[in-house]
Structures are given as structure tokens and as C-alpha cells.
Amino acid sequence: MSTPITREYFISPDHVLTALRGPNWPHAPAMMSIVTDDGQLTDVPVPAEWVQRGTLPEGFAVDFLFDPEELVLKVKNSGKNYMESWVLTECPWREIPPQAIQQMTGIVNDVGNLKIVPQWLYDRKRELTSVSVAQNTTPETIIAQRRAQADAGADVGYQAASGSGERKEKKKGFFKGLFSGKKKDIVRVGGIAEHKQSFESGARPD
């Protein structure tokens, strides 16, 4: 039975602990993002007790700067829809090498790709990412479209439906930094772009 390629496949069960510890553990605490009362996104050290427990308290989540849902889209655009098709195809040169899967999974769960953020901010970004994937565009484009609609009065319920957190986001525009990350690296290291080109052309690469 074929196994669909999903976002969850690329998420390590240890990603929360990785984010809690950060790149310099145990010598220095990881940094996490919070939103101040005046709507500023700022970084503060992760509390030591969180690291000791190895879990996040309610109200926080681990954000992926490069979301694995975007990776799933890139893989599917290269002609792959099931896990089995990654390792066995009729044309071996059309395969995505197994080591590429390891590399892409490693990048998604790399400490530099993880950041602890408020839950509402995580949920909002996930919604933006899902919408952008469905429309085959970028989260930044969706944000720009919605801001333009809100500014024009075309989307009256936009701010009211999302709560005070999003009103802060609209005012300060701090989502932009949360959509940066390792998009170029994951395409280069994973070989998705190169694979897609050879798959569509049917030409065997050297």
C-alpha cells in the first residue's frame, strides 16, 4: 500500500527538545520569541525549567522557519506523491536519492530552522503556509494580498476574527522574519530543482 508524502514525515520526534536546547547547549540558553505588550517581537532566553522538563508549556509551539509543508509541495512538484516512489521507480535516474531524503529531513529539524514562538503566532503562520501551498504561491504573497484587502476595506472581518495577536502583527508586520530560513539551502542540498528538471525532460543526468 502506497504511503502519501506528508508534512509529519519530515518532523523529528526530538524537534521540541532541539529547539529548547538551542545551538549552544549546555553552555548558553536557546532564544525564543515573545510578543511584548506594545506589539514588538523580541527574543528572550528559554527558561531553564522548560529545558529540564523537555516540554513546552501551554501557549507556545516550535516554529519551522522553513516549514516541511513547503517541502512536501516541492517534492510533489517534482513528480513524487508517495514515499515508495522516492526509492523505486522505473527509471533510476528519475529517483530522488535516499541521501537527499536524509539531508532534507536534517535541514527541517536543524536547530537553526527551529524557533519557539507563541502558539497563536505559530497557528497563524501555519494557516498562511497552508493557504499559500494550496494556491501554489508564497506566504508573503498571501500576507500582502490580505493587507491590501484590509487596507481597502474589502475584508472587514479580517482583524476581528483573528484576535489581538494578529492586530499586533498587522501593525508591526513581524511575520516577515518568520518566513525566512533555509529555503534556498533545502532546494540546493535536496536536489529538488535538479530532479524536477530531469524528470520533466526525461533526460538522464550525467
Image (cartoon, helix red, strand yellow):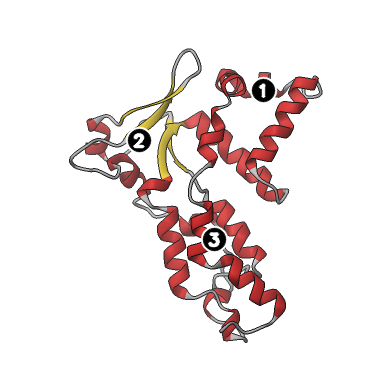
- Residue under the image location 73 percent in, 48 percent down: 135
Q: Position of residue 187 (x, y in %)?
A: 54, 60
Q: Where is residue 37 in the image (x, y as percent from the top left)?
A: 46, 13
Q: How far apart are marks 3 and 2 (CA)?
A: 30 Å
- Judged from this view, the residue extending furthest toward the front is 206
- Callout 2 environment at 10 Å: few (<14), some (14 to 19), or many (20+)? some
Question: Which quarter shows the C terminus?
Answer: bottom right
Tell which circle, 3 or 1, labels the residue nearer the N-terminal end: 1
Number of dots carrying numbers: 3
- Residue under the image location 72 percent in, 30 percent down: 146
- Residue under the image location 46 percent in, 61 percent down: 104
Q: Distance between the residues labelled 3 and 1?
A: 35 Å
Disc on res. 187: 3
Tell which circle, 3 or 2, labels the residue nearer the N-terminal end: 2
Q: Position of residue 180 (x, y in %)?
A: 52, 42
Q: Which amino acid does label 3 sit on?
A: Val
Q: Give the residue number, with chain letter if any, for mark 2.
A: 56
Task: Locate residue 28 relative to residue 153 in the image: left or right.
Answer: left
- Callout 3 environment at 10 Å: few (<14), some (14 to 19), or many (20+)? some
Nearer to me, 188 or 106: 188
- Callout 1 environment at 10 Å: few (<14), some (14 to 19), or many (20+)? few
Nearer to me, 51 or 100: 100
Q: Distance between the residues labelled 2 and 1?
A: 26 Å
**Residue 75, located in which quarter of the rendered image?**
bottom right
- Residue under the image location 67 percent in, 23 percent down: 161
Secondary structure at numbered mark 3: helix
Tell which circle, 2 or 1, labels the residue nearer the N-terminal end: 2
Secondary structure at numbered mark 2: loop
Q: What residue type is labelled 1?
A: Ala
